[in-house]
């Protein structure tokens, strides 16, 4: 590892995952930098001034999208542009196109999007809906957790995100959101869902309605039981109840962008409409 000691701050440039976690053990206050679109913006606003930065950009093992059997492995340093180009899921396609601008997507990384578990960030609800797992590495080695665990626990000190692993899922996959405007930018609230007829399972992710992205296991279990999987249909009442259960799973705040009441209402309506869209797609293509 070459460590370029400038005046301040110090910049650490590991070339392997082991070097990165070793450097974080020695420099626990170092700020990890993926694509830098948030870290650099914060620095230029004077918010963040750590003694050192640790750049992940030199670690080739962290980049790229690979397919293994039916599953997909997405390295933490994969840019959002490369993830979009990889055409991994229709749900990710819509979500990524709504995320910031092409210029930001060219630099921003998957790891940087999920690492801090910021509730307004776009990808975590999507990865919840796709039943993803997250691989992270620290001084003690590498571990793999479900996305559900990751959004509630986060990273331990000195850990980095290594990859996101998507299992094979078929069927309906959608992302929808409400935002202050109909262009790229942060959502006020978002819902991602996949309804897999092979696994006969429903997975949902919610954004903008909690401290982090949220899973909605009670709503998933309800809809899984309410779907007639052979006929590929469900009732209007079940669609409405699924929306209500999404609101129940939410824990939104009122802030300068929206009210908690509106956010709850938004996930209720988005949830119901997603199930209606699924029903429509099964019967009218
Ligand atoms: C104009 C603008 C619009 C934006 N719109 C959106 C939007 O709509 N939706 C959205 O989700 N985001 C948005 N963002 C935020 C940001 O660009 C993205 O979230 C981006 O994916 C962050 O990735 P990055 O690689 O640039 O992160 P960085 O800035 O490098 O890092 C972000 C955080 O993650 C940590 N980190 C980075 N990589 C790792 C890793 N592998 N392991 C551990 N920690 C890590 C850093 O220490 C830092 O705390 C926007 C930003 C801007 C400037």
Image: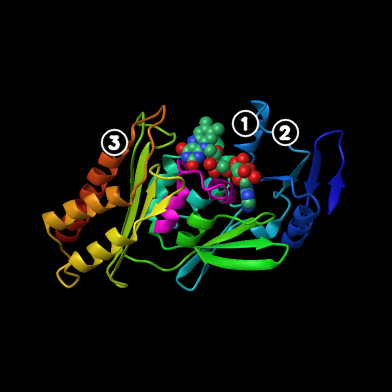
Q: Which residue is mark 2?
A: 49
Name the front one of labels 2 and 1.
Answer: 2
Name the front one of labels 3 and 2.
Answer: 3
**Region rendered in magenta:** 111-128
* CB of mark 1 near ligand 1 (< 8 Å): yes
Q: Which residue is mark 3?
A: 261
Q: Earlier in the sequence, mark 3 or mark 2?
A: 2
Depicted 227 relative to depicted 211: above or below: below
Image coords of residue 106 (percent x, y): 57, 41
Which of the 4 image quadrants contains residue 47? top right
Q: Earlier in the sequence, mark 3 or mark 1?
A: 1
The residue sitting at 72% across, 60% down in the picture is 17
Q: Which residue is mark 1?
A: 41
Cα gap from disc 3 to disc 2, whole angstroms: 36 Å
Q: Residues within 10 Å of mark 3 (few under 14, many from 20)?
A: few
Give the structural element (helix, strand or loop) at label 2: loop
Give the structural element (helix, strand or loop) at label 1: helix
Residue 102 seen in this snapshot: no
Which of the 4 image quadrants contains residue 70? bottom left
* Callout 3–callout 2 Cβ contact below 8 Å: no
Tell me: 216 left or right of 83.
Answer: left
């Amino acid at each position: 590892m070459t460590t370029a000691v400038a005046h301040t701050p110090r910049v650490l440039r590991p070339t392997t995952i082991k070097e990165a976690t070793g450097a974080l053990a020695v420099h626990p206050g170092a700020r990890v930098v993926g694509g830098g679109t948030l870290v650099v913006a914060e620095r230029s606003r004077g918010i963040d001034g750590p003694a050192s930065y640790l750049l992940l950009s030199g670690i080739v093992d962290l980049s790229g999208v690979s397919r293994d059997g039916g599953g997909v492995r997405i390295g933490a340093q994969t840019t959002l542009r490369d993830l979009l180009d990889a055409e991994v899921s229709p749900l990710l396609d819509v979500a990524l196109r709504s995320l910031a601008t092409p210029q930001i997507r060219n630099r921003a990384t998957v790891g940087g999007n999920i690492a801090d578990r910021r509730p307004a960030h776009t990808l975590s609800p999507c990865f919840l809906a796709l039943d993803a797992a997250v691989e992270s590495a620290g001084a003690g080695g590498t571990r793999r957790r479900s996305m559900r665990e990751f959004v509630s626990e986060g990273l331990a000190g000195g850990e980095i995100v290594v990859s996101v692993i998507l299992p094979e899922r078929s069927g309906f996959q959608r992302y929808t959101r409400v935002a202050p405007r109909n262009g790229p930018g942060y959502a006020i609230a978002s819902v991602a869902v996949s309804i897999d007829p092979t696994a006969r399972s429903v997975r949902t992710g919610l954004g903008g309605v909690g401290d982090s992205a949220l899973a909605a296991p009670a709503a998933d279990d309800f809809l899984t039981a309410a779907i007639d999987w052979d006929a590929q249909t469900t009732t209007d009442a079940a669609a409405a109840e699924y929306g209500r259960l999404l609101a129940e799973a939410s824990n939104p705040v009122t802030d300068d962008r929206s009210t908690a009441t509106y956010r709850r209402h938004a996930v209720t309506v988005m949830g119901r409409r997603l199930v209606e869209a699924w029903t429509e797609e099964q019967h009218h293509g």
